[in-house]
Image (cartoon, grey):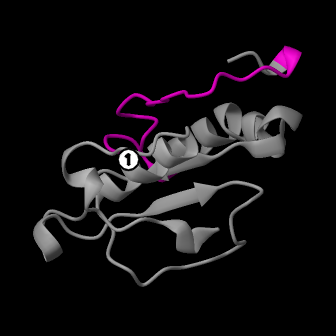
Amino acid sequence: MDLANDQLPNFSYLVPNLLDDAHDGPLQLADAWLQQNIAPLIASPAFQKDGLLVIVFDEANTNDSTDGGGHVADFIISTKAKQGYHSTTLYQHQSTLRLILHGLGVSSYPAAASTAPEMGEFF
C-alpha cells in the first residue's frame, strides 16, 4: 500500500497482532492501532474514490453460540455505503467473502459463498 503516492492495490488483507486486534489487549490499544493505520487509509483520495474496507471481529463471547458461532460485528466502510446503516439480516463469514469477491468483479463464488446471502443492502 502506497498512501504517500495515492496508489492502493486492488486488494489488501490487513491483520493486526493479537494485542492490537483487542483479542489479548484492551480496546484502547485496538482503537489506537485503527487510528494510526486505518484512519490515513480511509482519508486518502484513492480510498475515497472507490475503496471498500470491511472490518470483521472474528469471535463472539464464549457463551454466545447463536446460529453456530455467535454474533460478531462487521463494519462496512466505503463512500458508496449507506452511512450509519445497521442490518438485522443474519450474515456469516461466507457473505463477507462474497461481498469482497463481488467488489473485485468476480461473479462465481466458491463453496458456501455461492449460496450465502449477498450484502447489497449496505450500499
Q: Main secondary structure of the magenta part?
A: loop
Which residue does the image show at 79% across and 21% down from the upper left? 3
Regarding mark 1 in the picture, which secondary structure is present there?
helix
In the displayed structure image, the side of residue 1 where residue 17 appears, left or right: left
Residues 52 and 104: in front is 104
Q: Nearer the viewer, residue 70 or 62?
A: 70
Q: Residue at x 57, y 45 (%)?
A: 103
Asked if residue 8 is among those painted magenta in the image, a careful observer would answer yes
120 or 67: which is nearer to us? 120
Is residue 32 visible in the rendered image? The answer is yes
Task: Determine crowd level at label 1: few under 14, some 14-19, many 20+ residues with C-alpha closer than 10 A.
Answer: some
- Would you identify the image quadrant in which residue 24 lies? top left
In the picture provided, is 119 more to the left or to the right than 11? left
Q: Which amino acid does the dot numbered 1 rest on?
A: Leu
Q: Provide the residue span drawn in magenta.
A: 4-27
Read off the residue under disc 1: 97
Image quadrant containing the C terminus: bottom right
In the rendered image, the vertical position of residue 106 relative to residue 62, given as above or below = above
Q: Identify the image quadrant of the N terminus.
A: top right
Q: Position of residue 72 (x, y in %)?
A: 33, 64
- Whether residue 81 is in magenta: the answer is no
Above or below 121: residue 9 = above
Q: Is residue 72 above or below residue 49?
A: below
Quarter location, residue 118: bottom left
Question: Could you say which is closer to the camera, residue 26 or residue 116?
Answer: 116
Q: Give percent across and percent down for residue 42.
A: 75, 42
Q: Residue furthest bottom?
A: 88
Query: Residue at coordinates 44% horizontally, 45% vertically from top-left?
Result: 107
Left or right relative to 6: residue 37: left
User: Residue at coordinates 69% horizontally, 33% vertically from top-left?
Assistant: 36
Q: Position of residue 13 (x, y in %)?
A: 48, 29
